[in-house]
Amino acid sequence: MRPSSRTPAQLRPVRLTRHYTRHAEGSVLVEFGDTKVLCTASVEENVPPFLRGKGQGWVTAEYGMLPRSTGSRMKREAAAGKQSGRTQEIQRLIGRSLRAVVDLAALGERQIVIDCDVIQADGGTRTASITGAFVALTDAINGLIAAGKLEQSPIRQHVAAISVGVYQDTPVLDLDYPEDSDCETDMNVVMTDSGQFIEVQGTAEGVPFSRDEMNALLDLADAGIRELIAAQKAALAA
Amino acid sequence: MRPSSRTPAQLRPVRLTRHYTRHAEGSVLVEFGDTKVLCTASVEENVPPFLRGKGQGWVTAEYGMLPRSTGSRMKREAAAGKQSGRTQEIQRLIGRSLRAVVDLAALGERQIVIDCDVIQADGGTRTASITGAFVALTDAINGLIAAGKLEQSPIRQHVAAISVGVYQDTPVLDLDYPEDSDCETDMNVVMTDSGQFIEVQGTAEGVPFSRDEMNALLDLADAGIRELIAAQKAALAA
Amino acid sequence: MRPSSRTPAQLRPVRLTRHYTRHAEGSVLVEFGDTKVLCTASVEENVPPFLRGKGQGWVTAEYGMLPRSTGSRMKREAAAGKQSGRTQEIQRLIGRSLRAVVDLAALGERQIVIDCDVIQADGGTRTASITGAFVALTDAINGLIAAGKLEQSPIRQHVAAISVGVYQDTPVLDLDYPEDSDCETDMNVVMTDSGQFIEVQGTAEGVPFSRDEMNALLDLADAGIRELIAAQKAALAA
Amino acid sequence: MRPSSRTPAQLRPVRLTRHYTRHAEGSVLVEFGDTKVLCTASVEENVPPFLRGKGQGWVTAEYGMLPRSTGSRMKREAAAGKQSGRTQEIQRLIGRSLRAVVDLAALGERQIVIDCDVIQADGGTRTASITGAFVALTDAINGLIAAGKLEQSPIRQHVAAISVGVYQDTPVLDLDYPEDSDCETDMNVVMTDSGQFIEVQGTAEGVPFSRDEMNALLDLADAGIRELIAAQKAALAA
Amino acid sequence: MRPSSRTPAQLRPVRLTRHYTRHAEGSVLVEFGDTKVLCTASVEENVPPFLRGKGQGWVTAEYGMLPRSTGSRMKREAAAGKQSGRTQEIQRLIGRSLRAVVDLAALGERQIVIDCDVIQADGGTRTASITGAFVALTDAINGLIAAGKLEQSPIRQHVAAISVGVYQDTPVLDLDYPEDSDCETDMNVVMTDSGQFIEVQGTAEGVPFSRDEMNALLDLADAGIRELIAAQKAALAA
Amino acid sequence: MRPSSRTPAQLRPVRLTRHYTRHAEGSVLVEFGDTKVLCTASVEENVPPFLRGKGQGWVTAEYGMLPRSTGSRMKREAAAGKQSGRTQEIQRLIGRSLRAVVDLAALGERQIVIDCDVIQADGGTRTASITGAFVALTDAINGLIAAGKLEQSPIRQHVAAISVGVYQDTPVLDLDYPEDSDCETDMNVVMTDSGQFIEVQGTAEGVPFSRDEMNALLDLADAGIRELIAAQKAALAA
């Protein structure tokens, strides 16, 4: 039995609220149950130094948690003077996942910076971030098209992400915090709407996992991500 | 004529939403028009090193802006590796303002940390922060009383804050961003519900200001803060 | 009774020693009693990046305390690897105060950097810094005129600063360290020789202050700053 | 055809040289072809603060590259003042992989720090690090047993790691640098000698990968890791 | 001919002003001509962590230059966020030189921190610092004796320092800035009043130097340091 | 009697292994007994900002110790976020020593960066670094000549370095770690093959040293450096 009474293959309620704040070119509040992340997309008409003059654009991401998004207060990274290894891992993952579905040459010499800031955390903040960030990115790119700066979208496919894990010997979808803290295996899966993988990151938290368990987890993730991509499409059509 | 069509003595619509997130002991979203700040209060059952064993508590604050809370994206302070001078000034101001209305000895050997994170900025983030932080602090302290950890509240008075300024030669209340960027004098006033000052910070942005202008600004602030304290009381009574 | 036996409206002895060191374009040792600050002005024939090509100059300030300028040794900020929030607040205040009396367009595309280093502290280091820095700035600008780089001075008015506070229920002028550590209200006032305000920063250290107290403090500051500006003029005429 | 002329399932020559330096409790030079990493294990008779008094030990890792281990010189992280996100990701991975095969309670209240320093890089430094670090860790633990500080080994299983990827549409084992820079999918697999997974990290570098490709890669990794564990056993028996 | 018209073996005028500031236990302004350094000694009744409980004291030093102590303004190290390699080298040298003449066990479990801050620089700041710091240290220790905290002085000998160098093929004593910038060899010598060496640091600035040149420089230094120690004794007797 | 049973004037076995790693333009493992340092030389076709357009090149050095090169593990400087004062002193010394024998104008507008990384430490790492770095630098420069980028070598002379010290009242050559930790005087000498000094750095570790002791130490160093330069020549001829 899951603490939330969900069935093993059941996502938490997913909400994608576009235009959540008014300044950013894309601004989406993504909610996976009690996990709430604000994803903004900022268009900058220049590229980082390593890309100057190469005729292509860039998509990158930064991630942060509000100090009291969690059950006990975390030290503010700006006050600590550096981002933790976990923060850097997550923001690198978000950036790679988005770049994998964007034709950077077609984007032109501009950069889109995605900021994912966790307002409230209950497990799965990185997968919620990727899922919401894709919608914010799409809004920003549609804005460029509307402004005549791009002729057509450089986005090739939808991308979304979900966590899966073995909790009390059962493979389950979309771990919340109580499950995440107590599971044997934890896997984050990033997938496109053609059902192919962008990233698979599985970690044994104590007990190593077998090939069979891995397959069961990937099956769950596949179904979950199809639901998430449907939610993205519904939000973008609204 | 103010860009927002407000009268000189008119506040923007003020909203104080309690229990905005679920983990913190106090969690308030404060809105002054389009300025939105999430204020959380975290109770920690210890005090900073300089107060250990002195039989008193502490209230402190940290402040941050989400990178895209503003019109153009700001560099994330956690990535830059340090907080700006402006950030430090503001968080010191918030902390001092709250401590001025709390009996720290009566709070006992515990610390309450206030985090003010700007979700969307349109001028006046520091005054909105103080106004919202007071409500979050009160909720946290009421929680301590309800849990039997405090017998009565160490809060002596309400505190709220507002900005005033001389905009196109006219003293006006509660500057929004277009006014703030273009005003001659800018003053932040922090006041208690007995109408006394905690802080007055007036700055000439180009043209020095006279004693008469200062008095006109203080009159505006006095009336504005009374409205804000009424809003705090209404929110806490809800 | 004040610890120093001064009357409430009495400044400490003020001394402004020009040409205190020989390398800087302006170099002034300012003394307010036992508070001694070395203020140097350095002319640089370029402007910070955000002003390049805008046809105007810049005046900025940095502040520091020698580790043993105080009663007990303070950690050296260079060794600690960062400037404290207090340091940043003070140097921002000094910079704003000086810029408020300089016509930056008339200064041309150059920067004047003011360094205020506290040799010995006994309260009032920020107000002494502003008062001395103005003289160093004037010397540097007169040097530019003498060298034929400027035709006339871009300085519009004198600026000086003083602290006032409520000490043992009495408003007093120019707080020294024993008063500063033990006063109820502390206010720093920056004023021009036309008697107008550049900055007013009042803080309740425990007991909030009334409008009447504020007016009494501003009266004291007004008289004190007139004396300081007379001292600046005498020093510059010497 | 692979640049190195290897067959798709062929590892580079693997060498594990124990006692490579003389101070560390475990010191192993691991070579995967031209990739050379020095792995040392240091035993410390205390644990990090978050584990004090919990009756268990800890295993952690740090990773670094000599500035000229690579084709063009990399900036020295000590001079830059921080470790890159990549460095942090890798050292977190090494630490997790080793902890997954150690009974931390049986280790007692001590910490073993693994340092993996890349002397020469040609792709696969993180998988070589894990493979060599396990041997260094084993030597350090055997030293504790020999010294009578542990009765039996807290190591439950061998662990080793290898990279696999899709290079020119073909799944291949143990990517060297020319392959790594030009492959479509890159996966790092960490496995035990019972053939179970500790970590699986697959990343699409441009083209998403299918479930079939993933299965082919995992098959290659499984066989490669069996060879590596055999090499570990041979080295430890020598 | 030296730029200052001094003879090769002639020191600049040396002045040692005790009690230069009033808070520190020792406070000496040392002047070697236009080089002016404020040396303070602060007594702290504890020792650094690595010495706790070892029954001995410690003497350490920190060094800094005011940003405009030099001909062109140097970046403030506190703002830069770190001390330069040169600063660290100098403060380590000052600390070692003083510790070499103090019986640390006889000092007891306390630390004396020497701060050497350069007010005005004209070459030789490190040697002036050592020479002045010794007098400040002596004053601080005499204060401990006067307060009954020490029975007798743990200082074994005087220590002073001077620079020597080969300038236009001639060995000269006490290089000023014009000589220092243009000399072939530069040597700093730290000596006791028994004529023995604490430190000798010679550096070829372009042309290597011979054993004969080295001997000529050491002869000059020996005579110069005898003069400096006489000046220290005169100052302490005043 | 020396701990190693060496005679006072006896070097440890010296080995210089060229081409130790394959990416760098010069790569030398230098061994002084159990002290092992990897010295690489990297050619960069640009110069640091302060030299741009001045028609000359630059040689600089960085130094580091692997965390477990020593008897007890040292904190990794990249993790600590800064280089120690000792590290900076040593890398500045290496850079100065090499620049003293290179005609920087003849090198052209390029920079050679020397990295000295200590694999295993047993005293004398800085002198081994200089001795090995010279060989790596020579290999890099010979590569430039072979590639037609330089017509002739800008290296004027060989340079090598050795430590000497007074150990148990006897002057000895090439201190190893047990001697270094327990000696009264420690001197590092950097010399050319014409027998002239580049650097002499002598430090009393407790007992000041006399002119006679200094002369005895310099005699030892002179002979030792002649042996080292012979070893350099043999290695380069191999």
Image (cartoon, coloured by chain):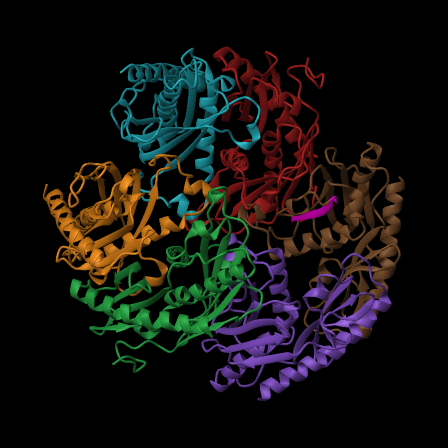
Chain colours: A cyan, B orange, C green, D red, E purple, F brown
Looking at the image, residue A28 sits to the left or right of residue F147; the answer is: left
Q: Is residue A218 above or below residue C163?
A: above
Residue at 81 percent across and 53 percent down: it is F160
Specify the farthest residue to the front: C151
Quarter of the view holding residue E141: bottom right
Q: Position of residue B149 (x, y in %)?
A: 19, 54
Q: Is residue F102 above or below residue E10?
A: above
Quarter of the image that includes the N terminus of chain C? bottom left
Looking at the image, residue E156 sits to the left or right of residue C45; the answer is: right
Q: Position of residue D223 (x, y in %)?
A: 60, 19
Nearer-the-camera pick, C94 or B135? C94
Residue D165 covered by magenta stretch: no
Residue at 63 percent across and 82 percent down: it is E232
Q: Position of residue E147 (x, y in %)?
A: 46, 85
Quarter of the view holding residue E215: bottom right
- Judge whether residue D181 can be spotted in this image: yes
- Judge whether residue A207 can be spotted in this image: no
Specify the farthest residue to the bottom: E238
Specify the segment rendered in magenta: F55-64
Q: Is residue E100 above or below residue F48?
A: below
* Main SS category, magenta section: strand
